[in-house]
Image: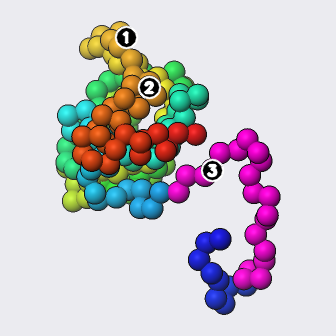
């Protein structure tokens, strides 16, 4: 049960007793997802890092907070699958589109899009909640494939970083669903 109700109209409603089906996994609750504690942010490029929130190896999918403290770049890549983004703070965009996203802005990118992510100088860090389905296909200057990055690469990066900063690789595994 969450915090006990005081005057809320729903205070006498009983919680459901059979919450999980036998084979269902527990929910994930993380306080303060866009935390200021930089240990949680895994370097993703030289200027952009990612706090993992939820990772699905089976679906090749993950949710994260993408963060840049100043000008940032995630070099050009192609998505064979969809991407959702919600901007928490800062300013960012893709070189390929004519919009610039700031706090509160939502973005959906359709499968089959290539782009170059840039973060602008801003009084607040860029923090964006992303739902990504892998892989990302890195592209060279001519738009040709130059490597890939999928959930397994992401897990590897996260584990190595969490181990290094003392959060422990196990903290990454706890995000698997
Ligand atoms: Fe992307």
Q: Which residue is mark 3?
A: 26
Residue 45 location in percent, x, y?
25, 32
Say which quarter of the image contains residue 163. top left
Q: Is residue 77 visible?
A: yes
Closer to us: 52 or 98:
52
Dot 2 and dot 3 residues touching (CB under 8 Å): no
Q: What mark, if any, has residue 145 been given in the picture?
A: 1
Q: Nearer the viewer, mark 2 or mark 3?
A: 3
Colour basis: rainbow
Tell me: 103 left or right of 140. Answer: right
The N terminus appears in which quarter of the rendering? bottom right
Dot 1 and dot 2 residues touching (CB under 8 Å): no
Question: Quick one: label 2 or label 3, which is nearer the N terminus?
Answer: 3
Indicate the secondary structure of the residue bearing disc 2.
Answer: helix
Q: Is residue 27 above or below residue 56?
A: below
At 77% across and 47% down in the image, what residue appears? 21
Q: Say if the magenta span includes residue 126.
A: no
Q: Nearer the viewer, mark 1 or mark 2?
A: 2
Q: Is the shortest distance between ligand 1 and the CB of mark 3 under 8 Å?
A: no
At 35% across and 9% down in the image, what residue appears? 144
**Residue that extends furthest to the bottom in the rendered view of this protein:** 7
Q: Is residue 147 above or below residue 93?
A: above
Span colored in magenta: 10-29
Indicate the secondary structure of the residue bearing disc 1.
Answer: strand
Q: Which secondary structure is most common in the magenta stretch?
A: loop
Q: How far apart, in angstroms, are the residues tagged by discs 2 and 3?
A: 22 Å
Q: Nearer the viewer, mark 1 or mark 3?
A: 3
Residue 3 location in percent, x, y?
59, 77
Q: Which residue is mark 2?
A: 152
């Amino acid at each position: 049960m969450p915090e006990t109700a005081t005057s809320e109209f729903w205070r006498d409603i009983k919680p459901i007793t059979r919450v999980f089906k036998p084979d269902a996994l527990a929910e994930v609750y993380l306080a303060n997802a866009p935390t200021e504690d930089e240990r949680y942010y895994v370097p993703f490029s030289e200027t952009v890092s990612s706090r993992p929130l939820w990772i699905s190896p089976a679906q090749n999918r993950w949710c994260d907070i993408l963060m840049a403290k100043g000008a940032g770049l995630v070099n050009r890549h192609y998505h064979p699958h969809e991407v959702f983004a919600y901007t928490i703070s800062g300013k960012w965009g893709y070189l390929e589109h004519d919009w610039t996203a700031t706090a509160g802005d939502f973005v959906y990118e359709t499968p089959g899009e290539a782009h170059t992510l840039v973060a602008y100088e801003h009084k607040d860090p860029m923090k964006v909640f992303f739902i990504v389905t892998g892989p990302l296909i890195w592209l060279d200057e001519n738009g040709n494939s130059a490597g890939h990055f999928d959930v397994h690469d992401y897990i590897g990066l996260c584990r190595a970083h969490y181990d290094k900063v003392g959060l422990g690789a196990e903290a990454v595994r706890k995000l698997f669903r």
